[in-house]
Amino acid sequence: MTIRALADNVSASDVLAYIPSPPRGVWDIGPFPLRAYAICIIIGIIAAIWWGEKRWQQRGGQAGMVLDVAMFAVPFGLVGGRLYHVATDYQKYFLAGGHPLDALKIWQGGLGIWGAVLLGGVGAWIGCRIYRIPLPAFADAIAPGILLAQAIGRFGNYFNQELYGRETTMPWGLEIYQRFDKNGGLDMMNGIASGAAEKIVQPTFLYELVWNLLGVAALILLDRKFRIGHGRLFALYVAVYCFGRFFVELLRDDEATHILGLRVNTFTSAIVFVCAVAYFIFATKGRETPEQVQAGVYRPLPWQFGALRAYGAERTGATAESAAAEARTSESEAGAEGETEEQSVDLGKSDSSESESPSAGNESAPDGDNPSESGDSEPAVTSEATKPVSSGKNDS
């Protein structure tokens, strides 16, 4: 029997080892639903903060600063991610058959990474301004950790059976099951799978996960070799992620908004990629020094709003006082230089007056003010004056 005939007699199911999806993504612990999606997001956030803290201290930053700034960035990022998802998939919530209140149910999945990064960056900017540390240096420190967090978060999509691609017969295809609740109703998010797989699809969540991990390795190697700074490593992270996400979007087949026949995330990936590359090319400053990334010793907690305002005012006053001190130092140095010049001018004048004093003495000699210093001409005048006096006495 030839190899081809043998292959024809073997069914595809005998040789293909498909990836099974988890039978469920939610476990009920009493009244509390434990969701794998939320667990993956939390683990990713913790990993990003922990690693970012280590990298921040290695760059000379103060301990605990990444966690403090994350208290601003994480809530902003979650809101931004949800807003992007709702805006790009608005038909699920606001068109016929949709429920607007479902837009608030973030635990059901649906976070757009671009919205999370955008508003998360706004939150980080607020925190960095309060604590007076440079945002570009902070972004470079946390960039690899954010990409690692995204890789961890993709496991949440795996448990939710979302972000998959078109149907395939590849050996690494992903099995998608129908899930049902306790009453037998179809519930793909909260139910439990039963029966055979509904379809075999491209595991795009896995492609993106692997790409993110490769991106993390690339960022670390490039940062160690070239000591990238001033936000350029963060821009490189954005470019790496968007490049891979562009091609992953071309493989996806789940429900999404389309523009000109392409998924909206495809356009977002391309636009953000170009912007990130442009920043990486034109922002040519080097890495910040340890002195530039250090903040004050005392730092109020993010929820201590009054203390934060006082801290910011104190830091601003200290900066202004430092600038005023520098200005006073410059003025005193300038005044000292001026006094030195005036002294040299005075010395020059005194020297010139001393050199002119002999001529003044000569001029005063005929007046008889200083007869002893009159010079050789004075004896002749005296002899001439004595002769008439002698002759007058003899005539008498």
Image (cartoon, rainbow, N blue to C red):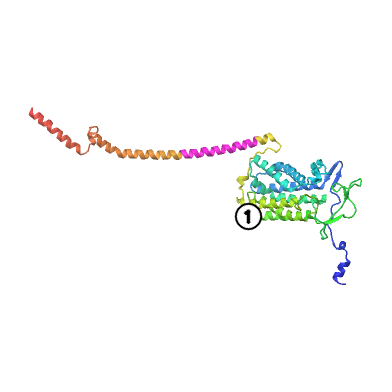
User: Hey, what amino acid is under mark 1?
Assistant: Phe
Taking the view exactly as shown, the residue that stands out farthest to the right is: 183
| 175 versus 75 height, above or below | below
Residue 137: image x %, image y %?
A: 64, 47
Q: Residues within 10 Å of mark 1 (few under 14, many from 20)?
A: few
Magenta segment: does it hold 78?
Answer: no
The image quarter containing residue 350 is top left
Residue at 49 percent across and 38 percent down: it is 331
Residue at 78 percent across and 48 percent down: it is 40
Magenta segment: does it hold 313?
Answer: yes
Task: Look at the magenta stretch and give its main secondary structure.
Answer: helix
Residue 319: image x %, image y %?
A: 59, 38
Residue 285: image x %, image y %?
A: 60, 50
| Quadrant containing the C terminus in the rendered view | top left
Residue 163: image x %, image y %?
A: 79, 52
Residue at 67 percent across and 47 percent down: it is 139
Q: Which residue is mark 1?
A: 226
Question: Which residues are the magenta region?
Answer: 310-335
